[in-house]
Amino acid sequence: MIDSQGFRPNVGIIICNPHGQLLWAKRIGQDAWQFPQGGIRHGERLQQALYRELKEEVGLGPADVEIISSTKGWLYYELPKNLIRQNSNPVCIGQKQKWYLLKMRCDEQNINLRANNMPEFDDWQWVSFWYPLSQVIDFKREVYRQALKELVTPLNRFLRP
């Protein structure tokens, strides 16, 4: 599903542990790390997409997490020209993303990167809150900065005793 401007709707997922560290996942067979994310299917509500992607990518269900916050609006990024599939119809020029900050309520042993038969990640680690900004691929960096900047205050409220 691609909107009239050429952007694919997508949910971004930031999972935090009780220490405020974030789940950072490595794309399968690559040296590329990112937060879990995925497209929203036609007719699917945002939270339905969130929980489907959460299950598909890291093996967690709704009972394993709690939504702390989400970005207020869509955050956009454009794909580099060499990644745009010009022969697709409609042409997708990038993604618009709604980001969710989730508190992990279960043991980290519940994380299962092989929960579906087409895994997207082959490794994961806990990282400090701002670490992803220096590690994510360039064309996603500004969206990550915007999402983290918007979600840092709700995270800090969650971490306060």
Image (tube, grey):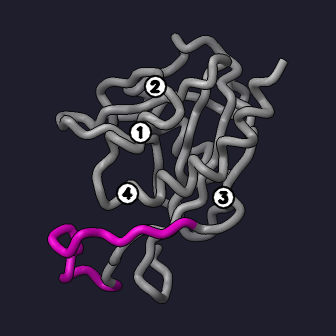
Q: Residue furthest bottom?
A: 4
State the mark number for residue 140: 4
Say which element carries label 3: helix
Label 2–label 1 contact, CB within 8 A? yes
- Dot 2 crowding, Cα within 10 Å, few <14, some 14–19, many 20+: some
From mark 3 to mark 1, how far is it between C-alphas? 24 Å
Give the magenta range.
Answer: 75-90
Percent across and percent down for residue 74 are 60, 68
Q: Residue tagged by mark 3? A: 46
Percent across and percent down for residue 116 are 41, 34
Say which element carries label 2: strand
Label 4–label 2 contact, CB within 8 A? no
From mark 4 to mark 3, how far is it between C-alphas? 20 Å
Tell me which label, 2 or 1, sits earlier in the chain: 2
Tell whether 33 sits left or right of 144: left
Percent across and percent down for residue 118 are 32, 39
- Residue 69 forms part of the magenta stretch: no
Amino acid bearing label 2: Val
Amino acid bearing label 1: Pro
From mark 3 to mark 2, how far is it between C-alphas? 26 Å
Tell me which label, 3 or 2, sits earlier in the chain: 3
Residue closest to the eye, 29 or 148? 148
The residue sitting at 49% across, 27% down in the picture is: 128
Q: Residue tagged by mark 2? A: 127
Percent across and percent down for residue 71 are 67, 57
Tell me which label, 3 or 1, sits earlier in the chain: 3
Amino acid bearing label 3: Leu
Above or below residue 139? Residue 23 is: above
Tell me which label, 4 or 1, sits earlier in the chain: 1
